[in-house]
Amino acid sequence: MNSYAILTYILKSIFISGVFTGYYWLALRNKSFHSYNRFYLLLSITCSLIIPLFSFTWFTIEKEEIPVSPERIGSLSLQVIDNNATAFPWLSILNYVVIGISIALTGMFALNIFRVYQLKRKSAVLKMDGIDFIYTDLENAPFSFLKNLFWKESISMDSTYGKKIFKHELTHIHQKHTLDILFCQVVNAIFWMNPFNWIVQKELKAIHEFIADKEAVGNSDVEDFARLLLQAHYGNHFLNPTHSFYYSSIKRRLLMLSTTHRTKFSYLRRVLVLPVSFMVLAALSVTTSETKATPAKTSTTITANTPPDVPEIKTAPSPVLPPRQPGPVARVKQPVKRVIKNDTTPTAVTGTVTALSIKQKDTSKPEFSIGGNKVIIRARTDSTKKTLPPNVIYYIDGNLASADDLNKLSPNQIKSINVWKGETAVKKWGAGASEGVIEVITKMVL
């Protein structure tokens, strides 16, 4: 998988996560169906990882085909490409940065798990119904990790407060909330550049607390449990204004505990997830079919209010415009003959051309090398790539030469390049030039 494919996958994943998270924020957040919200958030992460791997083509937008006449004259330009020029490898550096951050986050994730088990080894462990009950004096206890319950020694198991907190932590263990968080942390360590996955992880933690609080309260007084909840987080001085009560998740937990009314349109809110999922798939399945230009069966004619016999027209020299791209441009000033079709009567027009412009009936893009650099003749008539005829003849300053002789020249030595084709080449260079002639005129060294 190349860098472009990886970037496309990441962008699709972020788009899917954004759509699912946006719908959750608008229709499901802070609603009483916590188990459904838990399933929905886990599903959103899973979809953002799996859907971008597949290609859907339900809708195709086709661009209108533009016919191209075989008589169309394409403007040709010569461009010297330096094979030794190298671009700054910014894409490779970006890949290393992304991989480096992912490795660092994965290392921190593994280190945190190691610290949990290290704490378990240093503490007293009591086996109880398949759960390891671990006594500790940590400030943030009690807390649970998989089937391990870390209990603060200062909390009595016989007190009302201790019983409710114990039931709260048992809910985390029985419903395997730790697996949800581990899954989110692994995904965020690898795809850390997706901001919506971090939001989902935070919301999942809050939903876990809502579920555990509801199980801990049961049929008892909600106000008593709320008071115990505040005491557990802020100690005996929980009314101290220096504590950030209104910016804590405790506010949401108390709000959800005190909410007794049923959510309006709760069934509709959950069912609307299906059309949202369909819209995501539809947005990712739209593809564009680009049709290449094809030669038309009829030729384009030039209709003019002039008699069939057009007199000879001589064009005045014009200055050569600077190139649009860096690199030298070969200046060509050589008499050529061009045929303009006026209905069906051919009329010859001769003149002097200062910029290379050649009538192309085929769509060839010949190329050759000068001094180790590739010279490409580009036409705007079609995208089919062809090479020079095998019997093309090279002349350097009027002397017959080979492709190797031409390749030995430096671009700085070249004054101009003339391309001769068809009857014009035969008239100037003889019958052997029917395949075409490339004439190179070098600069005179004084």
Image: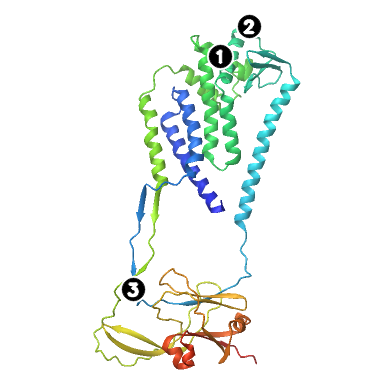
In the rendered image, which residue does mark 1 sit on? 227
In the rendered structure, the answer to whether residue 134 lies left or right of residue 43 reads: right
Q: Is residue 186 visible?
A: yes
Q: Could you tell me which secondary element the residue under label 3 belongs to?
A: loop
In the rendered structure, the answer to whether residue 94 lies left or right of residue 304 reads: right
Viewer-proximal residue among 250 and 167:
167
360 vs 350: above or below: above
For badge 2, the amino acid type reads Asp
Q: Residues within 10 Å of mark 2 (few under 14, many from 20)?
A: few
Question: Which residue of the protein is positioned furthest toward the top in this rendering?
Answer: 158
Name the quadrant of the C terminus: bottom right
In the rendered image, which residue does mark 3 sit on? 69
Q: Position of residue 38 (x, y in %)?
A: 49, 27
Q: Earlier in the sequence, mark 3 or mark 2?
A: 3
Q: Earlier in the sequence, mark 2 or mark 1?
A: 2
Viewer-proximal residue among 60 and 238:
60
> Which of label 2 and label 1 is nearer to you?
2
For badge 1, the amino acid type reads Arg
**Which numbered disc covers residue 360?**
none
In the rendered image, which residue does mark 2 sit on? 158
Q: Residues within 10 Å of mark 1 (few under 14, many from 20)?
A: few
Q: Position of residue 405 (x, y in %)?
A: 61, 84
Give the CA separation, mark 3 to mark 1.
Answer: 84 Å
Q: Could you tell me which secondary element the residue under label 2 belongs to?
A: loop
Give the CA separation, mark 2 to mark 1.
Answer: 18 Å
Q: Position of residue 153 (x, y in %)?
A: 70, 14
**Pointers 2 and 1 in contact (C-beta within 8 Å):** no
